[in-house]
Image: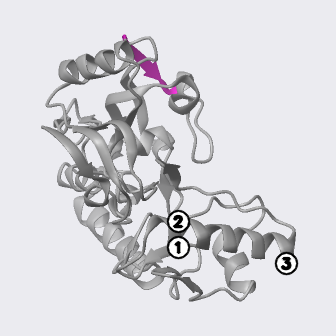
Amino acid sequence: MHKLNEPLSAHTTFKVGGAADVFVQPANEDELLDILQECRKSNRPHLILGNGSNLLVRDRGFRGAVISLLGLNDMYLMDDDSIYAGAGVLMKDLAEFARDHSLADFEFAHGIPGTVGGGIFMNAGAYEGEMKGIFISARCIDAQGGFVEAGINDMDFGYRKSAAQSRGLTIVSAILKGRAGDKGEITAKMSELEAKRNEKQPLDMASAGSTFKRPPGHFAGKLIMDAGLRGYSIGGAQVSEKHCGFIVNKGDATSADILALIKYVQDAVQEKFGIKLETEVKIIGE
């Protein structure tokens, strides 16, 4: 797939953002390598995109190439407890595949709206599970344009970070490990976590998930709520009434609305509690 002036609002869960000059979706890792090498040769800025679930694109879009990895979606059982998954496999599909093969420890991933590649890149997690806990290795393309293998000791996983960020690695695929479990128990746990999410998170509204990182010793949502900002809006952007850690698009938000609300929330929490909230969502474009 190759498109010009493609609106990125169609490729992000926030449903906002201007157009990319070029939008490409390679069908396999060799196509991806060719595209990355062409971008480097021509000095064209590029952005790797998964499901667009942790991303805010500014209203004027992205001057360069956006490379979607959703075409890298092969997935199969490696052995009794390991799964091969392409970077574009959705986390929900990964968790359901593991469940169908009676593999436990993937349940947390079911409600994360991103991809395997994005999940590893930011060590995504929820409900006491994180990608670090199921990771064995990843096949990546490094900043010099070559394939490299990265094991658990190479990835330097931390809270919402990995060495893929600091080393400029593009994750192509991964091998992930669970443990033998009871399919009924796994299904029940996934249903329990889904019910918790539905109860506490504004899943019926466009967002990028948790907008802010958790400050040490605090919860971003509680700080925002205690600052009196539940439901506070700027334009079409709103602090969720259901969970104050989420900024949501009421339907007609612009990126400028969301950015203004992020700054307003940061300033209010800083003033009231002396705590600087850092964004978890990645902000790109112009």
Distance from disc 3 to disc 2, alpha carbons, whole Å, reads: 21 Å
Please, is residue 76 above or below residue 265 in the view?
above
Looking at marks 3 and 2 on the same chain, the residue that comes earlier in the sequence is marked by 2
Residue under numbered circle 2:
210
How many numbered marks appear?
3
- Residue 25: in magenta span: no
Q: Residue at x 62, y 41 (%)?
A: 158
Task: State if disc 2 and disc 3 touch (CB < 8 Å).
Answer: no
Amino acid under disc 1 = Phe
Give x and y (percent) for residue 265.
Answer: 68, 73
Looking at marks 3 and 1 on the same chain, the residue that comes earlier in the sequence is marked by 1
Task: State if disc 2 and disc 1 touch (CB < 8 Å).
Answer: yes
Quadrant in which residue 201 is drawn? bottom left
Give the numbered dot on residue 246. Answer: 1
Please, is residue 248 above or below residue 283 in the view?
below
Give x and y (percent) for residue 99.
Answer: 24, 55
Please, is residue 105 above or below residue 42 in the view?
below
Considering depth in this image, is 100 or 14 the residue closer to the camera? 14
Please, is residue 172 above or below residue 195 in the view?
above
Q: Which residues are magenta?
A: 146-152
Left or right for 236, reference 184: right
Q: Secondary structure at mark 3?
A: helix
Give the numbered dot on residue 272. Answer: 3
Left or right for 170, reference 155: left
Amino acid under disc 3 = Lys
Give x and y (percent) for residue 244.
Answer: 59, 79
Give x and y (percent) for residue 235.
Answer: 50, 82
